[in-house]
Amino acid sequence: MWSDWQQLIEYLKDSFSIKGDMLSVLFLVGIQEAGTGFRHYSQEEKTGLIKLAKYILLSNAGYYQKIDVPGRDPLFIPNENISLPNASELVDSILKKELLTYFNKTL
């Protein structure tokens, strides 16, 4: 459905009234993955949801292994066979690719 980052951003801006930046999109993924729905979130909760989204996406890309723990948030352990790049631009590129894949599967 979406092969271009900007196309996805425009759709999400129109559909969810978000700013259209990476953090806003990660926040949407975090809400979806946590299953908490739209409501008012504290700054700490927003940060937690964004981190959850990053870990989910990076585990989908193979950089982390997700371990579900009953009654707790999942744990994410770095994959010993593949290292996440140090450059933030490369990580952003990986996240954008994974976000396109994520939304193509879920929407």
Image: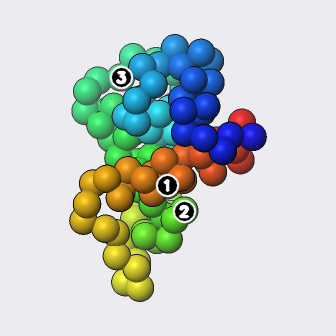
Q: Position of residue 41 (x, y in %)?
A: 36, 23
The numbered mark, 2 or 3, whose residue comes first in the sequence reads 3
Q: Give SS at disc 2.
A: helix
Label of residue 41 in the image: 3
- Disc 1: CA contacts within 10 A as few (<14), some (14-19) or many (>=20): many
Q: Position of residue 86 (x, y in %)?
A: 24, 65
The residue located at (59%, 15%) in the rendering is 14
Q: Residue at x 35, y 47 (%)?
A: 51
Q: Are marks 2 and 3 in contact (CB under 8 Å)?
A: no
**Furthest residue in direction right, as rendered:** 1
User: Label 2 belongs to which residue?
Assistant: 60
User: Which SS class for mark 1?
Assistant: helix
Q: Look at the image and tell me in which quarter the C terminus lies.
A: top right
Cα–Cα span, label 1 and label 3: 21 Å
CA gap between label 2 and label 1 equals 5 Å
Lower position in the chain sequence, tag 1 or tag 3: 3
The residue carrying mark 1 is: 57
Eye-nearest disc, 2 or 3: 2
Let me know if residue 27 appears in the view. Answer: no
Q: Is residue 57 left or right of residue 21?
A: right
On screen, 14 above or below 53? above
Q: Amino acid at mark 3?
A: Tyr
